Amino acid sequence: MIEVLIFISLLIVSYLLGCLSTSRLIAKSFRSLNIYKIGSGHPDTQNIYQNISKALGIFAGIVDFSKIYIYLFLLDYILGNNSSIATQNHLLVLGFVMIIGHCLPVTHHFKGGRGIFTYMGFIAFFAPYPLFIAAVIALIVILAFDQIRFAQYMIVLLPPFLSFFFQGTREFLGKLFIAAILMGIINFFVSKRLGEI
């Protein structure tokens, strides 16, 4: 019963940590700007990079990536392998709840970022090599063809397929596919809210 309560508490903490908008904080702290009134009006790394500062955009991406990776690492370390709420399934759920908080933060009227870098940190924790390969391919697509949106789709969709070439159970691959599908659904709603669809 105690572990159930702890897990519920961690779900809430995960969501609220996700609600901390890196792009919003960076725009406000470094330039005293309201990210919602800049460029696309979208509180994400891409808007920071394209309309405020490339350096700050890169910094925002690194922070978004790191916050979920470090969070999952600390959870895994603190809870330990002996805890019934420290299984891979539990960490997957807690990590994805953090992504939901990033994309749909209740603290900002559900106006969050796309969560691509946060998702990358999430996948990097569970499947680092597939994520690295997908990131390199996506970077090539951006540099060669200037297709940022297509590269974002690749980041979401490629890791589950690439995981076939690395050690991993069929069950684990299924979990990665579920995460990719859910991420796609979240981004659909984000894009629809922005009037892109």
Image (cartoon, grey):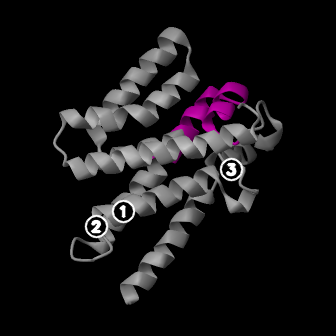
The residue most toward the right is 37
Q: Which residue is mark 2?
A: 87
The question of residue 118 being in magenta is answered with no
Helix, strand or loop under label 3 = helix
Q: Which residue is mark 3?
A: 25
Residue at (72% x, 31% y) in the render:
196
Q: Amino acid at mark 3?
A: Leu
> What is the chief secondary structure element of the magenta stretch?
helix
Does residue 22 lie above or below 151 as drawn? below
Res. 108 image quadrant:
bottom right
Q: Which residue is mark 1?
A: 91
Left or right: 175 in relation to 64: left
Residue 118 visible in the shown view = no
Callouts 1 and 2 close, C-beta under 8 Å: yes
The disc, 2 or 3, on the residue closer to the chain's N-terminal end is 3
Which part of the image, by quadrant, shows the N terminus? bottom left
